[in-house]
Image (tube, rainbow, N blue to C red):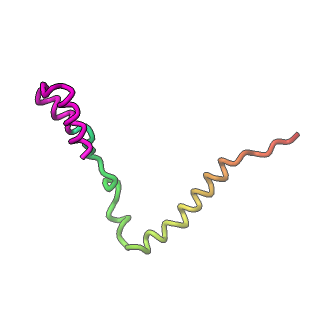
Amino acid sequence: RHSLRFGRLCLYLHDGQLDTDSLLKIFRWSDEFASAFLSLRAEDVKGGPIKIVEQIAPMLDSMAKVIDSAKPTPQKS
């Protein structure tokens, strides 16, 4: 929807005097072909919800380590 509105705006601003390449670039300015699902591996997904629950503990441990490393060290006076 936003691509169409942006394309129409450009057509109006250029009085319809745009070549084919420009029109394609204008109307397809927001095309995104990357997918968040490309990094998923089938062996990680197998097992259903229990597999997800098993991954929570290691994630929490990793987050705790990051938080501990971000804490400022107390300075002696």
Q: Where residue 15 sits: x, y (%)?
A: 15, 26
For residue 26, what is the image quadrant?
top left
| Quadrant location of the C terminus in the rendered image | top right
Q: Residue furthest right?
A: 77
Q: Is residue 8 magenta?
A: yes
Residue drawn 32% across the image and 56% down it:
37
Left or right relative to 38: residue 57: right
Question: Compared with residue 11, is residue 71 higher up or lower down, i.e. above or below?
Answer: below
- 33 and 57: which is toward the camera: 33
Left or right relative to 46: residue 2: left
Residue drawn 59% across the image and 61% down it:
61
Q: Where residue 58 sits: x, y (%)?
A: 54, 63
Q: Is residue 22 magenta?
A: yes
Question: Compared with residue 44, is residue 31 higher up or lower down, i.e. above or below?
Answer: above
Q: How many marks?
A: 0
Left or right relative to 73: residue 65: left
For residue 57, what is the image quadrant?
bottom right
Left or right relative to 58: residue 14: left
Magenta stretch, residue numbers:
1-27
Q: Where residue 44 sits: x, y (%)?
A: 38, 64
Residue drawn 12% across the image and 25% down it:
17
Q: Where residue 31 sits: x, y (%)?
A: 25, 43
Residue drawn 19% across the image and 30% down it:
12
- 12 and 45: which is toward the camera: 12
> What secondary structure characterizes most of the magenta part?
helix
